[in-house]
């Protein structure tokens, strides 16, 4: 009898409203009222020990008294009463419970929330919430929320971590004519979270696009896993807030949810094919386009306009949003010429001029749709004195019908009230339309972004079978852990990196002049000598470093000189010895690193080294593990790439060597969960085929 | 009798519609109809030789037959008839003519357009157009256009280079509730252009904000001059689209190619206090805010919200748009606490929570307005189940009234139809309101941007009295011009730079071993030797350069070696000699350049040198002449600035030396109009007080 929890939440078969109230100002009243007026066809039960009847329904004292099966229990009683109510839900064997009530973790009542989750686990049902607005579903249909009104029917699922925003956006989407398949308020995510709904809507045949408002993604690894699969099938758009430092503070103070570093979230979202929207306006603008148009088969876009200025706006916006305006082949330009005066333009944007009639629009759009070399069409219209928006909308719809071709057509109608009406009509007929050329182009840009992200997810990923010395690596880490250290010594870090096949500049610690000479002879000249002392930070300032020593004599003298100088200049410094290392030839400086994000797990970083990395923030992130293709993409995405490829006659650098190290570092942190951070900075890259060298390796372990 | 042309165009006293038509499908009908129905109070005359009466008005055969004074003639006859009509206007001594007719330069009829301008000059009247939609003015009021309907009355002037957009935006602004003081269609700008209207609206008491849609700014110097003055008094917002092919074509040098036409326009607009909007949506969103709110006295902004999520959106947007959320002082947070439950947040954004009532909103907004440490207030509201948008709008308006304080208050009401209504009401009552927190914050950002740009225009500008050798400089240029050259030789360029006090690395061309040694002795060791040959591009590859030569013997040997190597490796190369130059100590590499933009005149560039400049496009532009303050601002705006200031323990560079050279270069190109491009790359900057050195100077002259 009991059904899968999430199914029962979105598409319940029967509902009990616990805390149903006769007072119209109470949430318990509003929810029951919404359920009853939403067209829900299953049995509805009211539960309230203090009433006999609510809104014409018989009222039960407890959910256990309800005669029929209860698929979804919606709980709107004061927080302190929730645990007892949930026990009763458990006894009644409900499929799932939506806990509307607030007064839990969000106000500091962590224990009460834990108690609620335990009860659900004990009785084997799932919980949505607590602290939610509820659920609206336009398929069942059902509105089990205290929103005012219901969303319009549509194909966009919306999952929201903010309750206030859920209510407000129901009204906003209705005003804008945006239809939803369902709306879910996540609340405190005590049990079910965005990942569960992502999975559900991923296989929901009534949902074409999934949208979400998120403040934090707590289980980032699972999010990536699910989103990577769902994105292959349908687009996911996310409004993830908390970019600014200050916003992160605000998020902590208001829901207790920790927002991960924004750069990591940004990288992770892109990696699993998710499109990030800058505000809810774009979230739905773009979702509408993705729900309505087919995915284009190619990148060739044609813009048809009746205003030169509007055409230029579209061109500027195309560049901004990654939409590629094609060079129109000659034979096609000749076809377009039939629909414009002699001073019209066939140089994409196709400018039919202000004289453009319904027939010209229809003809031009038809030609663009019929030509197999054109993959998407953007139609721009400025309301003129000689036409009205209805004619133009008709022209577009007729051309589309008569061409019998399925291609993305995106429209902008610029003008007043009449344009607004036709924008809504076109959109509802499958042609997304917007008030400005920029918005239309941004929406098509989102369609192309989805296409490219999905194509990337479909590409082969190669995870090479690396030969590594995991045993030794584990021994090194265990030794440090045993000593209670979270920082590996430079020697341990270098050794660990070498276990994973990362080329590291060899460094040896010596404690005597003789040993220094012997080591230098073994390593080969020229060498560098550096003091090893915890008290010496700036080695150069105290004569603690000597470069480019070319023979035994210089090394012997150098050893003495360094020790003497440091002893004089830093009295009392603990001198552990002197590090002898090869004087590495200078290569292009890059940075390779790893940080273990609390939500998304290990994240690999690659970027320009030296001062550049901090001045221009030329760093790219990706969540580990990395395939060879992903590692290469990281390198290609940096500004440093132009330099590495051999900029302005410089030698091409060994990019394969970087890719190799990125994959190996990714493998290292995936194999060894004790590692928290890795910092290879600088890594010197040499000419093509000549490899690279980690000059400095730092490794931090997770605090125990 | 005759009035100032532009005054007659915007606020005519009497109008003659020449080409008035009885056919409602004709533009001549629409214009007369609009004039008559727009509430225009002056005399209106219809002119049409083929009709006796149009729309109830007696029709005159020619404008000369009109009995009264004609202030503005609106011409809507076929292009070929325009010249004769204009002669008649001249004879009638009209103040100005708006030529609606198209069929001139925009379709290639350049001569016809010139003829029209000549006629106007001859008879001493001004022309708007041709190829325009007309003029709407809500002050007179008058609608002398073929737009459908008239704009709402308001305080925003709109000047548009696109006719189609003008018509479309009349409808759009009405739909959005945006009021205009006037709308002008510029058309082909045969006579009057954006600068004339900028000047007019700058002193128009009915206009608070000037907005413009521009594709090109032909007279950029005049634009800067006028806009710099107008911006001190009222904000100018511009939607500038596209990139001018014409400007790009003229670009030859390195600096020139960096100074894409659009980058120059961007820099020029900012320099004269103009705010650039990304689309017409933001153009009017921001104009409304600037027309409605006072300029804030300080940067402290408080956000008041009832939704944590919406507060985070506002916080992210604040950072994006340069709005500074203040840390609220403790005594004020205590006041805010009165208007929220215990789990509300007083960490700006002030989160009143979803429980927020009208009274709480009113109280919190009142406290924020009354506190003198708060300079602007952003109010965010998510439509909830417990309040309605009207209450909240009332709360804001009441708090504003009762506080008796004039401060910017910007609002976002998130929700459906009811919110939309209140957005319009709030805006009309002087509180700009928007559908999303991002839009509200962007609008306040524009207000702050205007404040900062205006403050900068008000700052003192110091133009030092530089002692330069202009006479010698002119001689150098004249010599080159006489020889028909547009490129100065490296020696000429260096000499010219030195005339303007720019420190240049000394280079001398020698043709014998002995001369090389003698020159090196004079310059001082170490020196560099470089082959001078037009055929040798990559000197290093052919052994054509030798660095760090420390004595006479090395220089003598080096001279021979270089010549021999080049002769062997580049047979037939014309060897003009060997350049001897001092081995300059390595400094921080920067780039200093000038490009003479065809529209805005000489533009100075400063940025990171070396490969950096191209990889990260770290270049800042400003139109010359530069004050010391502007030159310093340029340096401060680059990413290189962090480096120059002494990044990560590096020595601070001599920023004053850069500022000095920027000012001198700016003076040089202002003094010498023959110079088209200057490229000082690299310029080495040394430690503070140690100056800098131009290593390479290239100067191009204007093609004759």
Image (cartoon, coloured by chain):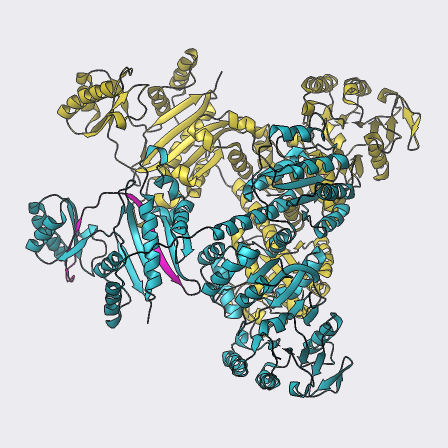
Chain colours: A cyan, B yellow
- Please give the name of the residue rendered at 40% of the width and 23% of the height, measured from the top-left corner: B699
Residue nearest the observer in this picture, A393 or A491: A393
Q: Position of residue B631 (x, y in %)?
A: 44, 37
Q: Is residue A602 visible?
A: yes
- Quadrant in the picture for residue B92: top right
Which segment did they paint magenta?
A569-598
- Is-magenta flag for residue A465? no
Determine the residue positioned at 33% across, 47% down. A611
Q: Position of residue A646 (x, y in %)?
A: 35, 37
Q: Is residue A36 left or right of residue B347?
A: right
Q: Position of residue B7 (x, y in %)?
A: 74, 31
Can the viewer see residue B397 in this picture? no
> Which quadrant: the N terminus of chain B?
top right
Query: In terms of depth relative to the viewer, which is nearer, B257 or A5?
Result: A5
Taking B23 as reference, is B642 left or right? left
Q: Is residue A570 magenta?
A: yes
Q: Position of residue B460 (x, y in %)?
A: 49, 39
Q: Is residue B449 above or below residue A328?
A: below
Total numbered labels placed on residues in the image: 0
Left or right, B358 with respect to A477, comes to right
Question: Looking at the image, is B295 positioned above or below residue A337?
Answer: below
């Amino acid at each position: 009898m009991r059904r899968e929890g999430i199914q029962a939440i979105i598409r319940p078969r029967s509902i009990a409203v616990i805390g149903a109230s006769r007072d119209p100002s109470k949430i318990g009243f509003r929810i029951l009222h919404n359920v009853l007026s939403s067209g829900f066809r299953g049995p509805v039960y009211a539960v309230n020990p203090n009433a006999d009847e609510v809104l014409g329904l018989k009222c039960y004292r407890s959910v256990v008294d309800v005669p029929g099966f209860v698929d979804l229990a919606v709980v709107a009683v004061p927080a302190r009463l929730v645990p007892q109510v949930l026990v009763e839900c458990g006894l009644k064997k409900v499929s799932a419970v939506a806990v509307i009530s607030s007064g839990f973790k969000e106000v500091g009542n962590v224990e009460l929330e834990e108690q609620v989750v335990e009860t659900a686990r004990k009785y084997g049902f799932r919980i949505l919430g607590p602290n939610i607005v509820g659920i609206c579903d336009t398929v069942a249909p059902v509105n089990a929320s205290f929103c005012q009104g219901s969303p319009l029917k549509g194909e966009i699922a919306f999952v929201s971590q903010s309750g206030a925003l859920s209510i407000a956006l129901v009204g906003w989407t209705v005003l804008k004519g945006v239809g939803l398949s369902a709306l879910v308020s996540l609340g405190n995510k005590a049990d079910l979270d965005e990942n569960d709904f992502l999975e559900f809507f991923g296989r929901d045949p009534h949902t074409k696009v999934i949208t979400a408002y998120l403040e934090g993604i707590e289980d980032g690894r699972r999010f990536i896993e699910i989103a990577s699969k769902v994105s292959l099938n349908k687009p996911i758009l996310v409004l993830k807030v908390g970019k600014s430092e200050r916003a992160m503070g605000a998020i902590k103070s208001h829901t207790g949810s920790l927002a991960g570093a924004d750069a990591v979230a940004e990288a992770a979202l892109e990696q699993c094919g998710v499109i990030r929207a800058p505000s809810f306006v774009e979230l739905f603008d773009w979702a509408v386009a993705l729900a309505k148009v087919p995915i284009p088969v190619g990148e060739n876009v044609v813009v048809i306009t009746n205003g030169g200025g509007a055409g230029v706006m579209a061109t500027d916006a195309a560049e901004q949003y990654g939409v590629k305006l094609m060079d129109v082949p000659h034979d096609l330009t000749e076809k377009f010429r039939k629909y414009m005066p002699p001073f019209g333009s066939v140089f994409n944007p196709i400018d039919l001029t202000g004289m453009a009639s319904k027939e010209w629009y229809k003809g031009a759009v038809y030609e663009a749709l019929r030509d197999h070399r054109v993959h998407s069409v953007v139609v721009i219209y400025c309301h003129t004195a000689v036409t009205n928006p209805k004619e133009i909308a008709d022209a577009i719809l007729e051309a589309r019908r008569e061409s019998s071709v399925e291609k993305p057509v995106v429209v902008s109608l610029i003008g007043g009230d009449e344009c607004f009406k036709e924008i809504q009509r076109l959109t509802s007929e499958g042609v997304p339309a917007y008030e400005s050329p920029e918005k239309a182009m941004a929406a098509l840009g989102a369609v192309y972004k989805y296409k490219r992200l999905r194509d990337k997810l479909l590409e082969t990923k190669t995870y090479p079978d690396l030969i590594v010395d995991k045993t030794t690596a584990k021994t090194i880490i265990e030794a440090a852990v045993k000593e209670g250290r979270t920082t590996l010594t430079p020697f341990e870090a270098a050794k660990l990196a070498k276990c994973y096949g990362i080329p590291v500049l060899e460094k040896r610690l010596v404690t005597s002049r003789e040993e220094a000479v012997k080591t230098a002879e073994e390593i080969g000249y020229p060498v560098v000598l550096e003091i090893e002392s915890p008290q010496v930070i700036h080695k150069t300032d105290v004569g603690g470093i000597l470069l480019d020593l070319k023979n035994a004599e210089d090394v012997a003298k150098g050893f003495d000189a360094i020790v003497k100088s440091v002893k004089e200049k830093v009295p009392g410094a603990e001198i552990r010895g002197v590090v002898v290392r090869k004087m590495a030839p200078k290569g292009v400086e890059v940075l390779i690193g790893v940080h273990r994000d609390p939500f998304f797990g290990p994240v690999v970083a690659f970027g320009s080294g030296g001062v550049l990395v901090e001045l221009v923030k030329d760093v790219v992130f990706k969540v580990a593990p990395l395939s060879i293709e992903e590692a290469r993409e990281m390198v290609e995405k940096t500004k440093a790439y132009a330099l590495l490829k051999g900029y302005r006659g410089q030698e091409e650098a060994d990019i394969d060597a970087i890719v190799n190290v990125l994959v190996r570092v990714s493998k290292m942190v995936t194999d060894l969960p004790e590692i928290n951070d890795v910092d290879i900075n600088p890594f010197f890259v040499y000419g093509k085929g000549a490899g690279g060298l980690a000059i400095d390796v730092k490794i931090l372990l997770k605090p125990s």
